Each structure stands twice: as structure tokens, then as C-alpha cells.
Image (cartoon, rainbow, N blue to C red):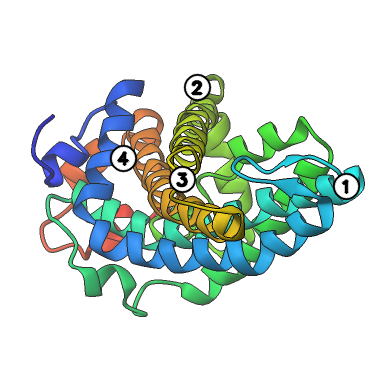
């Protein structure tokens, strides 16, 4: 794998599925010192403050939190809440990830302070749409298979807001339009990326917890706190990785379907960066 850098992260051409997944990892590696600490805080709040009370009410047990002896209705509420919280966290991380991806496309590595700065960040809109995305994903997950459609369609919300800089009322239509282009290519790749990281998360978390238990390093008293810490650590990597995938997938879709690479090549010298990448010039 090439060294992380702006050209390696996002070359000015359409990418294969494998290249997109590699680019997301490279972007995460370049921005890990920004994205991972934020993800760690958000993932800890999700595990300890939001999901654990519902897990206790539903009667689930670690390491994978299957329903053991409790209410199925509460367990279903737990699943829908988890779908909503992880979508919100990925959306919030999508703001700095999208800004870092945009900088990489323009040939430079964004500084930590730059991707978190209020100027141009549209943070108010990001928080608003995180709540919207959380609500939509909660409803979609409650309806079962509808979750797949919801997750596939909402990946470009943060990039459309921060990079494309479309008006607020056009963010959701813009995200949906990009996800469904070319036979819903972007939406399906986002689902593929989620599935890959879900398998990795379950494998790492369950393997670590079961391994510690089998070795006698964790007794029954510490089983749940250790499980929460392990899941927090795993999600602190997976969530920013998925946000980075959203960023590179968004920009690659614009290159593939809107000729963004051609527009960048033809842009007059001295054009401000936000204007270069705005969807409407």
C-alpha cells in the first residue's frame, strides 16, 4: 500500500471498489489523530450512556449482546437505537472527514485545526442533520429491511453539506441523488463497507472478550465493563473509517458522474477552495 498522502488518497480519476476502500483507510490514517479521539468520546457515550441501559432492560449478554432472557420489544428498541446512534456518530465524523477528503483531492493534507475549525464547517447544519439522519435511521431500522435502503441513501449527507455547500433544504435530495447514480453504485459500496467493518467489529470485539474470559483475566463482575470498553475501542476505529469512506466515495462519485476532475483542471488560478468544490458555481 502506498504511503498516505493527498495523491494516494484521492487521484483525479474514477476508482475501483477496492481502490475506494483503500483510499478510505489512507484518509483515516492521515487524519487519525483528529478523527479517532472524537470517535472514542462519541463511541463511549453511545456504549455507556445510551445502549447499556437498554441492554440491561432487554436482558442481553456480552460479547455480542444477543437477547438472552428479556423483552423482545425492548431488544428491538435497542437495535433501532443502536442504528440511530451509529448513523449520527458517522454523520458527525463525516464533517471533518469530508473536509480532509476535499483537501486531499486538491493536493494537500489538511491540518488538524483546519478540519475542526468553525469557519466554513457548517457545524450547526451538521448537528441538525445528525439528528435528522438519526431519526430517519431509527424509523428505517424499526421497519427491519428498510434499514439497508436508509443506510445506502444517507452517506453523502455530510459531504453534500460541507463540500458541495448546497442549501440546507437540498442536502437530503442531493445525498439521495448521488447515492442512486450509476445503478445505485455509491449506495451499494457504502453498504459493502459497513458489512466489512461490521464483520471486523464483531470478530475483534467478541474474540477479545472471549479470549480474556477464557484466560481467566476477566471475572463475572468485570465482564460487562470490559465488554463496553472493548466495543468502544473497536467502534472508535470503525466509525471514522466509515466516515472516511463516505468522504472519498462522495468525491469519486462526483468525478465519475459530474466530471469534477475536469472542472478542477479548468478552474481559473486563484479560485478559493470552497468555490472549487461547490456543487453550484
Which tag is nearer the camera, tag 3 or tag 2?
Answer: 3
Marks 1/3: CA–CA distance: 28 Å
Q: Which mark identifies residue 24?
A: 4
Q: What kind of element bears circle 4?
A: helix
Instruction: Give the spatial CA distance, label 3 vs label 2.
Output: 52 Å
**Residue 266 screen position, x and y as percent:** 18, 44
Q: In this view of the protein, can residue 170 be seen by the observer?
A: no
Q: Nearer the viewer, mark 1 or mark 4?
A: 1
The alpha-carbon separation of the residues under discs 1 and 4 comes to 39 Å
Q: Earlier in the sequence, mark 3 or mark 2?
A: 2
Neighbourhood count class around disc 4 (C-alpha, 10 Å): few under 14, some 14–19, many 20 upward: many
- Compared across the picture, whether 262 is left or right of 63 comes to left
Q: CA distance from mark 2 to mark 4?
A: 20 Å
Determine whether label 2 and label 4 are within 8 Å by CB: no
**Upstream in the sequence, badge 1 or badge 3?**
1
Q: Which residue is mark 1?
A: 70
Residue at (39, 71) in percent of width and height: 121
| Residue found 31% across the figure and 53% down from its top | 277
Give me the C-alpha separation between circle 4 and circle 3.
Answer: 37 Å
Q: Is residue 116 left or right of residue 132?
A: left
Residue at image coords 54%, 52%: 227
Amino acid at each position: 500500500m502506498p504511503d498516505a498522502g493527498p495523491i494516494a488518497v484521492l487521484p483525479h480519476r474514477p476508482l475501483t471498489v477496492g481502490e475506494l476502500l483503500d483510499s478510505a483507510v489512507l484518509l483515516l490514517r492521515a487524519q487519525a489523530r483528529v478523527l479517532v479521539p472524537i470517535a472514542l468520546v462519541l463511541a463511549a457515550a453511545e456504549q455507556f450512556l445510551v445502549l447499556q441501559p437498554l441492554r440491561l432492560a432487554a436482558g442481553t449478554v456480552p460479547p455480542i449482546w444477543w437477547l438472552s432472557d428479556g423483552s423482545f420489544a425492548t431488544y428491538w428498541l435497542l437495535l433501532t437505537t443502536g442504528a440511530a446512534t451509529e448513523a449520527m456518530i458517522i454523520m458527525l465524523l463525516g464533517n471533518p472527514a469530508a473536509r480532509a477528503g476535499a483537501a486531499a483531492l486538491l493536493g494537500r493534507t489538511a491540518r488538524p485545526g483546519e478540519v475542526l475549525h468553525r469557519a466554513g464547517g457548517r457545524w450547526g447544519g451538521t448537528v441538525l442533520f445528525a439528528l435528522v439522519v438519526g431519526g430517519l435511521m431509527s424509523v428505517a431500522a424499526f421497519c427491519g429491511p428498510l434499514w439497508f435502503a436508509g443506510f445506502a441513501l444517507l452517506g453523502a449527507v455530510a459531504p453534500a453539506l460541507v463540500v458541495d455547500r448546497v442549501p440546507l433544504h437540498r442536502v437530503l435530495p442531493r445525498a439521495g441523488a448521488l447515492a442512486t447514480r450509476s445503478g445505485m453504485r455509491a449506495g451499494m459500496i457504502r453498504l459493502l463497507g459497513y458489512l466489512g467493518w461490521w464483520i471486523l467489529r464483531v470478530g475483534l470485539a467478541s474474540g477479545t472478550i472471549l479470549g480474556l474470559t477464557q484466560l481467566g483475566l476477566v471475572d463475572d463482575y468485570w465482564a460487562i465493563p470490559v465488554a463496553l470498553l472493548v466495543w468502544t475501542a473497536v467502534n472508535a476505529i470503525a466509525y471514522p473509517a466509515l466516515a472516511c469512506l463516505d468522504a472519498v466515495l462522495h468525491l469519486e462519485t462526483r468525478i465519475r458522474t459530474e466530471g469534477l476532475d475536469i472542472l478542477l483542471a479548468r478552474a481559473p488560478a486563484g479560485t478559493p477552495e470552497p468555490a472549487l468544490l461547490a456543487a453550484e458555481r
